[in-house]
Image (tube, rainbow, N blue to C red):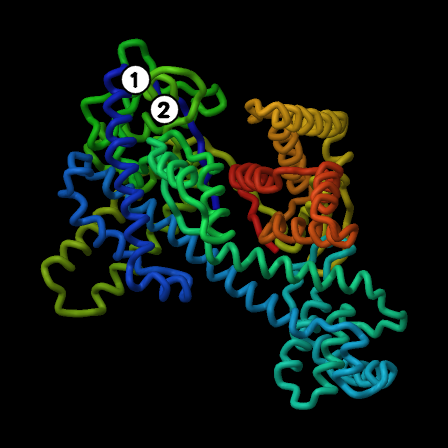
């Protein structure tokens, strides 16, 4: 994606801020909460959960009667559209997550059923361990030629640096074939032999199995299954409780009643400990012409929003973002001066979003909290070369739409008007906006920059030639940061210090929400800058980033399994797990990946995920 998000602070009169807060906090956020509730209580909800998606139109249908509800009436049309879009987005993500968790749960349960110790496999198969190994070797010999052919046909672009503990593409393919063979196996001996291979990494293990390590491995899978089941049972989008009404209701119930079971007790505890956001949901403006840009009498850039035209907001931003907002104003003025002969589809601004940023302090919330505007921009539309690229894509898309519509024949009046509008747009996108020139980045498609993330080392980079699979060079975290490497140790020390301060505050029952400095984010920006520089130096066609799916769950399960091996006492397990977490370096990998993606988008380098 060539789109990035920039932000600015919006400054307005107190009356404007008060009015916007009332609309967002007292009308729009309760509307979103109600829509979230109604979707979760829909008769087809369980069916949607199984499918992993819901019909997009259902939220719009639920919202229609609510527009005349006294609790939500009086909002601009854009606010209703934003609420519908946000609820759709929340549930689209949630259903996809639940489907993935369900798929993972089924896979974990299947693997736990297959995962048996050598003693159990010998007992189940009815043969000796040596005979089981011989059978496993026969199966391995049968599948290896097939696996080799599949590996050779794999796209060479997937070659990248992997950690030693990770499975290679060849082993992954072999494991897949073994799982399929296990399901098709008819005799017990074959299934036991395949199970033996899978648990030993698709190899024959000549050493005696360590019973303690195997028990820890099995327990780790059991913990993962338990956690996945809890996720599937308890996590439903709940919205934002700005008035703390639900918290107070739960507090009254918890102080007056006794929980019927442990599940209910945990539910009460989670509700009381949950820190709900104190600011309303944001409002999205999904079209760039919903915002009107102008300059006030002091020469400062200001903006007005569709549905809030009586209120104006001044833009306050960093000098690094100022040129973007100047461009928004220029694009709109050019289109206006040309009497709409230019197309807004080539505006650098794509969409916007108004949000409140929570701040500490006493007083009215519209005075304490800050207003922010998040803008999505297409970096290609900054230059003439990039704009021409976008124009060609849009022209091709419009021409295809017109052709498909005409192919239907016997067009009605609505379809004819649609074609007329498309032809008009096609004519207008040929009128160029004045843009600076800058050559587009052209990398070599076979050169890849692979980024590896780890617990001890936040990032390691490898430059790979995809045609040969050869690693051209490696760059460690020390090489990436150079003279700034000392900042990494300083950031670790800060985390340990804050962790200690938090523990002391908890002991004294004092507030323990200590904010961290932005040193971690600064280090991420240094790393991202160097990764992009390396990609440009080697003319890399793409940067390959790892997927972070279930990383937290895997680490948590492993820590808990190790803790249980240390002692059967629950307190000892908790203490060990706590000490282990402190000793392991923590890093915001999602933030680092997000910054790399943003910087790559500005440069024009493709991002891949493996």
**Picture residue at 16% right of the left edge, 59% below the top:** 415
- Residue 12, numbered label: 1
Quadrant of the rendering where the C terminus is positioned: bottom right
**Picture residue at 57% right of the left edge, 46% below the top:** 442
Residue reaching furthest right? 207
What residue would you read off at disc 2? Answer: 371
**Picture residue at 26% right of the left edge, 57% below the top:** 58
Callout 1: SS? loop
Q: Is residue 541 visible?
A: no
**Picture residue at 69% right of the left edge, 71% below the top:** 151
Left or right of 163? Residue 349 is left
Callout 2: SS? strand
**Residue 348 spot, x, y in % from top left:** 38, 35
Whether residue 243 is situated above or below residue 51 in the rendered picture: above
The crowd level at tag 1 (other Cα within 10 Å; few <14, some 14-19, many 20+) is some
Whether residue 407 is situated above or below residue 235 in the rendered picture: below
Q: CA distance from mark 2 to mark 1?
A: 9 Å
**Residue 394 spot, x, y in % from top left:** 35, 50
- Pointers 2 and 1 in contact (CB under 8 A)? yes
**Residue 506 spot, x, y in % from top left:** 61, 27
Q: Nearer the viewer, residue 503 or 312?
A: 503
Whether residue 278 is situated above or below residue 71 in the rendered picture: above
Q: Is residue 197 visible?
A: yes
Residue 257 figure quarter: top left
Left or right of 125? Residue 87 is left
Among numbered discs 2 and 1, the one appearing first in the sequence: 1
Q: Nearer the viewer, residue 18 or 325?
A: 18
Left or right of 582? Residue 352 is left
Residue reaching furthest bottom? 187
């Amino acid at each position: 994606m060539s789109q990035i998000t920039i932000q600015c602070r919006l400054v307005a009169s107190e009356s404007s801020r008060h009015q916007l807060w009332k609309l967002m906090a007292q009308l729009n956020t309760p509307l979103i909460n109600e829509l979230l509730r109604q979707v979760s209580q829909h008769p087809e909800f369980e069916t949607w959960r199984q499918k992993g998606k819901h019909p997009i139109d259902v939220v719009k249908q639920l919202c229609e009667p609510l527009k005349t509800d006294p609790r939500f009436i009086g909002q601009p049309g854009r606010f209703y559209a934003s609420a519908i879009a946000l609820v759709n987005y929340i549930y689209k993500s949630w259903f996809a997550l639940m489907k993935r968790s369900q798929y993972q749960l089924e896979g974990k349960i299947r693997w736990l059923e297959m995962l048996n110790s050598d003693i159990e496999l010998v007992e189940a198969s009815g043969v000796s361990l040596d005979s089981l190994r011989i059978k496993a070797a026969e199966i391995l010999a049968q599948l290896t030629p097939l696996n080799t052919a599949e590996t050779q046909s794999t796209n060479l672009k997937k070659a990248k640096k992997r950690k030693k503990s990770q499975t290679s593409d060849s082993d992954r393919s072999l494991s897949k074939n073994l799982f399929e063979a296990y399901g098709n196996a008819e005799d017990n001996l074959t299934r036991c032999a395949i199970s033996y291979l899978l648990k030993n990494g698709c190899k024959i293990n000549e050493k005696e199995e360590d019973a303690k390590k195997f028990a820890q491995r099995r327990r780790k899978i059991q913990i993962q299954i338990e956690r996945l089941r809890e996720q599937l049972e308890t996590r439903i989008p709940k919205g934002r409780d700005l008035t703390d009404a639900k918290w107070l209701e739960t507090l009254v119930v918890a102080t007056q009643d006794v929980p019927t079971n442990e599940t209910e007790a945990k539910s009460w505890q989670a509700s009381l400990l949950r820190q709900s956001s104190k600011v309303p949901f944001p409002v999205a403006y999904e079209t760039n012409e919903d915002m009107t840009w102008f300059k006030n009498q002091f020469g400062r850039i200001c903006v007005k929003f569709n549905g809030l035209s009586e209120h104006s907001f001044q833009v306050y931003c960093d000098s690094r973002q100022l040129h973007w907002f100047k461009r928004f104003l220029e694009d709109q003025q050019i289109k206006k001066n040309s009497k709409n002969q230019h197309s807004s589809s080539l505006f650098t601004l794509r969409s916007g979003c108004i949000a409140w940023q929570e701040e500490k302090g006493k007083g009215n919330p519209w005075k304490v909290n800050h207003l922010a505007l998040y803008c999505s921009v297409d970096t290609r539309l900054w230059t003439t070369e990039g704009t021409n690229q976008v124009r060609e894509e849009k022209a091709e898309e419009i021409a295809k739409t017109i052709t498909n519509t005409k192919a239907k024949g016997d067009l009605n009046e609505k379809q004819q008007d649609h074609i007329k509008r498309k032809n008009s747009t096609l004519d207008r996108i040929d009128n160029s906006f004045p843009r600076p020139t800058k050559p587009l980045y052209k990398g070599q498609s076979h050169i890849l920059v692979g980024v590896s993330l780890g617990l001890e080392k936040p990032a390691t980079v490898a430059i790979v030639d995809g045609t040969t699979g050869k690693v051209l060079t490696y760059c460690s975290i020390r090489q990436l940061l150079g003279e700034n490497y000392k900042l990494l140790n300083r950031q670790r020390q800060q985390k340990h210090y804050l962790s200690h301060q938090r523990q002391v505050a908890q002991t004294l029952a004092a507030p323990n929400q200590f904010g961290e400095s932005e040193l971690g984010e600064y280090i991420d920006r240094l790393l991202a800058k160097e990764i992009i520089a390396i990609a440009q130096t080697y003319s890399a066609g793409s940067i390959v980033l790892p997927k972070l799916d279930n990383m937290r769950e895997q680490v948590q399960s492993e820590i808990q399994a190790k803790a249980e091996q240390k002692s059967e006492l629950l307190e000892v397990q908790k203490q060990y797990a706590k000490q282990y977490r402190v000793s392991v370096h923590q890093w915001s990998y999602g933030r680092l990946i997000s910054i790399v993606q943003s910087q790559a988008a500005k440069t024009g380098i493709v991002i891949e995920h493996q």
